[in-house]
Image (spheres, rainbow, N blue to C red):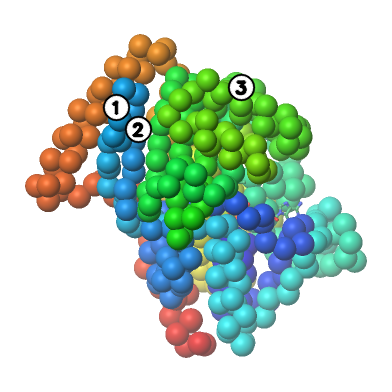
């Protein structure tokens, strides 16, 4: 996502980027992400917001199911954000690049960077498959477990990962709950479930949060073991869990530990990181795609303004994006605490009563004309500083 957006903006500014991606194609179906309100504003300015909204989910309400009540608490959804399949969003960005005839982006799909050797004028890059090449700059937009980060930055990479003591299972299933345009949510002590409808309401995207100090690392368990893990956590739960667990057994489940990337500096010489590779806010924050897009815009913009001085560009990029990242990284620890609270059952009961009372207050406020609080992450980001990045689209289209 960050890589596609960055390449598009760099190419508009006359750079000739090469994208290297280990994946032979887009990420698997079933992987849904949320684009924050600020991220959507940015896509609107690019002229692609409507396309993304058309492909994404249009949730009108959050249904908070609490124990002992037959009807959920209904909360309005912030209409500014959109949930969309990861590969659909990337495709929108790629199609925009294809549409602009004067944009030049080279792609090396199915390959990966294995070595970086920097000198005064550039970086020699070795690949798993392609022959060695020389580049002026290298950007690691290669996600949470970024290989570029490990190659370019010294010290154990594990020290840059902040685990949030929860594992998150995700899967996609037919809409066994029959819900319409909504996001259903239920929590129990140490665990929680979110089931969101996807466009057409025919399918559900299910997120299961499991409080645990031991991270389930990618690839460490096979599908059978992952299914058993989820079953153990939620097997005794009521609400819709019997239906959702039965649906899960028919499909593949992905489990990732809730994780952030924390770094004091995002560049080393000619190498710089963007998106999850530099500052992953964690999938439970709902801020990853938005901050990836904001970071890509700022990095491209600063490289364009810096007139060849990459050190200056990297410095300005960090200064522009850090405040947004700080806000975004504050979200996930709260999401873990709300979504899978570390409480005893009696505390859960008290908490749910408080939520019900609060929601009555919120509904009253809405009737009186007060709208729900908007997602404030990225409000301070100086989008206008990069306005020329958007103007170019109009000139070259
Ligand atoms: C299962 C899952 C569910 C998620 N759900 C949500 C959600 O609900 N809400 C939300 O906000 N966020 C969610 N996220 C996080 C969100 O996907 C990221 O924050 C966002 O995609 C960040 O964009 P990025 O471009 O930095 O990284 P990515 O989108 O992860 O892109 C990284 C790219 O690097 C490539 N790559 C990786 N390794 C190599 C290598 N060795 N060599 C070459 N290329 C490589 C990958 O193929 C990929 O194209 C989820 C993530 C996952 C994994």
Q: Residue furthest left?
A: 368
In the picture, measured across the screen, residue 175 lies left or right of residue 61, that is: right
> Few, some or many C-alpha atoms within 10 Å of disc 2 (few <14, some 14-19, many ≥20)?
many
Residue found at x 68% / y 72%: 17
Residue 163: x and y in percent read 59, 30
Residue found at x 52% / y 30%: 242
Is 32 located above or below residue 257 in the figure? below
Residue 211: x and y in percent read 54, 24
* Pointer 3 residue Cβ closer than 8 Å to ligand 1: no
Q: Which mark is residue 65?
A: 2
Q: CA distance from mark 1 to mark 3?
A: 25 Å
- The residue at which mark 3 appears reads as 232
Marks 1 and 3: which is nearer the front?
A: 1
Is 41 located above or below residue 214 in the figure? below
Residue 269 quadrant:
bottom right
Is 365 located above or below residue 148 in the figure? above
Question: Between residues 260 and 76, which one lies in front from this camera angle?
Answer: 76
- Whether residue 97 appears in this view of the structure is yes
Q: CA distance from mark 1 to mark 2?
A: 7 Å
Residue 337 quadrant:
top left
- The residue at which mark 1 appears reads as 69
Is 397 located above or below residue 289 in the figure? below
Question: Between residues 158 and 374, which one lies in front from this camera angle?
Answer: 374
* Pointer 2 residue Cβ closer than 8 Å to ligand 1: no
CB contact under 8 Å: marks 1 and 2: yes
Residue found at x 75% / y 58%: 23
Question: Between residues 26 and 129, which one lies in front from this camera angle?
Answer: 26
> Few, some or many C-alpha atoms within 10 Å of disc 1 (few <14, some 14-19, many ≥20)?
few
Q: CA distance from mark 2 to mark 3?
A: 21 Å
């Amino acid at each position: 996502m960050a890589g596609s957006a960055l390449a598009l903006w760099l190419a508009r500014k006359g750079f000739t980027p090469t994208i290297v991606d280990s994946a032979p194609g887009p990420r698997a179906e079933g992987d849904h992400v949320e684009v924050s309100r600020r991220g959507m504003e940015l896509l609107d300015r690019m002229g692609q917001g409507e396309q993304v909204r058309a492909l994404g989910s249009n949730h009108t309400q959050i249904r908070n199911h609490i124990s002992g009540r037959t009807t959920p608490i209904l909360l309005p959804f912030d209409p500014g954000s959109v949930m969309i399949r990861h590969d659909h969003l990337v495709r929108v960005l790629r199609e925009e690049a294809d549409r602009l005839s004067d944009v030049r982006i080279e792609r090396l799909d199915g390959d990966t960077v294995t070595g970086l050797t920097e000198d005064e004028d550039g970086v020699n890059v070795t690949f798993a498959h392609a022959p060695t090449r020389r580049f002026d700059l290298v950007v690691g937009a290669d996600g949470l477990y970024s290989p570029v980060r490990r190659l370019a930055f010294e010290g154990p990479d594990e020290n840059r990962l902040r685990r949030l003591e929860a594992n998150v299972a995700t899967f996609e299933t037919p809409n066994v709950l029959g819900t319409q345009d909504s996001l259903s949510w239920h929590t129990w002590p140490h665990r929680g479930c979110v089931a969101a409808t996807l466009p057409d309401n025919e399918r559900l995207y299910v997120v299961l949060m499991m409080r645990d100090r031991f991270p389930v690392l990618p690839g460490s368990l096979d599908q059978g073991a992952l299914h058993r893990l989820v079953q153990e956590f939620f097997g005794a739960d009521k609400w819709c869990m019997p239906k959702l667990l039965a649906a899960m057994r028919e499909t593949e489940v992905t489990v990732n530990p809730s994780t952030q990337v924390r770094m004091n500096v995002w560049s080393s010489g000619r190498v710089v990181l963007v998106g999850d590779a530099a500052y992953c806010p964690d999938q439970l924050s709902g801020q990853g795609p938005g901050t990836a897009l904001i970071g890509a815009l700022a990095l491209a913009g600063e490289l364009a303004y810096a007139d060849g001085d990459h050190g200056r560009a990297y410095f300005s990029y960090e200064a522009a994006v850090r405040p947004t990242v700080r806000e975004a990284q504050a979200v996930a620890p709260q999401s873990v605490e709300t979504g899978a609270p570390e409480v005893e059952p009696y505390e859960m009961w008290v908490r749910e009563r408080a939520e019900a009372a609060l929601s009555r207050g919120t509904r009253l406020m809405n009737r009186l004309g007060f709208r729900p609080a908007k997602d404030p992450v990225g409000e301070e980001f100086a989008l206008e500083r990069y306005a020329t990045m958007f103007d170019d689209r109009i000139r070259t289209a």
